[in-house]
Image (cartoon, helix red, strand yellow):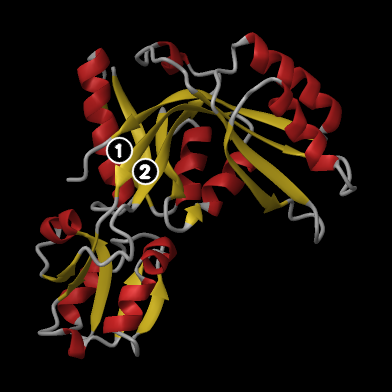
Amino acid sequence: MTLSVAHLGPPGTYAEQATIFYVKWLSHSSGLEASLRPYSSIAQSLQALAQGETQLAVVPVENSIEGSVTMTMDTMWQLDSLQIQSALILPIAHALISCADSLDGIKTVYSHPQALAQCQGWLRAFLPNVQLIPSNSTTEALEKLEYDLSIGAIASSRAAELYNLPILASRINDYAENCTRFWVISQAESDITHQLPLQKLTHTSIAFSVPANVPGALLKTLQIFAHLDINLSRIESRPTKRSLGEYLFFIDLEADVNTPQMKSALLELTTYTEVLKIFGSYSVLSANNQ
């Protein structure tokens, strides 16, 4: 059986690079083969999975410089049928790609908003007057470069090689230890979950809303984990989109959902939450930058 894996495209994105790493690991660990299916947005990748167009999706969830990828978080909350199978960490090294003769000729730079933000210091120092235009992915604008010498794009060196385009500057991200965490996601009730390699489950991701914005509403939920000695590795709030000042809370926990402590914590958590969603338990894989 050949699995189909959704990811953010076009070819050359970091999401594709993370997907290639996961597919190679999957083949080595279990013999499963997979084909890549690029989509034009993170939301479309997850929706394709939810609709059964693919068996897995690889999506970015958090960057070490710019924090959470909100489209992933919001879409995960909206879709009820998805479950995290693995997480993987991919080092990120951005390059400025352009057909211009020098930096002086560049008037406009395109890239994904996260990439633009991760290079904002370099852009201020070397291209202070350029227009920055967000795009759906780091590679979306690459096909324009050979037709317009005044534009550049921020993407990976691998993307430059794929599109046969010159690199004007390498490793332009503001912090050298830049990396992005991705989630590998399946449908919760899919048969494919039983075919994936067994791993030691080290993390669990959940999200919840509270019944009312009152003093202590969040504290009561967090105290549950503190009393049971369960460490939180991330907590983030997102608007409910119902009313200003109402929030959802996304939490990553360093524990397997199947342990007695976690079962007890989640049961008690239902007392203090309006809606509780358990996205799944998983292990974390680390990829080398290519």
The residue indicated by pointer 2 is 7
| Mark 1 residue type | Thr
The residue indicated by pointer 1 is 19
Residue 290 point in image, percent of width and height: 17, 45
Q: Counting other residues with Cα less than 10 Å from the Cα at mark 1, is it few (<14), some (14-19), or many (20 or more)?
A: many
Q: Nearer the viewer, residue 36 or 102?
A: 102
Above or below, comparing residue 106 to residue 47 in the picture: below
| Mark 2 residue type | His
The numbered mark at residue 189 is none
Q: Secondary structure at mark 1?
A: helix
Residue 144 point in image, percent of width and height: 23, 74
Q: Secondary structure at mark 2?
A: strand
Above or below, comparing residue 2 to residue 159 in the picture: above
Q: Quadrant of residue 175?
A: bottom left
Residue 33 seen anywhere in this rendered image of the structure: no
Q: Residue at x 57, y 45 (%)?
A: 73
Q: Say whether marks 1 and 2 touch (CB < 8 Å).
A: yes
165 horizontally vs 287: left or right: left
Q: Counting other residues with Cα less than 10 Å from the Cα at mark 2, is it few (<14), some (14-19), or many (20 or more)?
A: many
155 horizontally vs 221: left or right: left
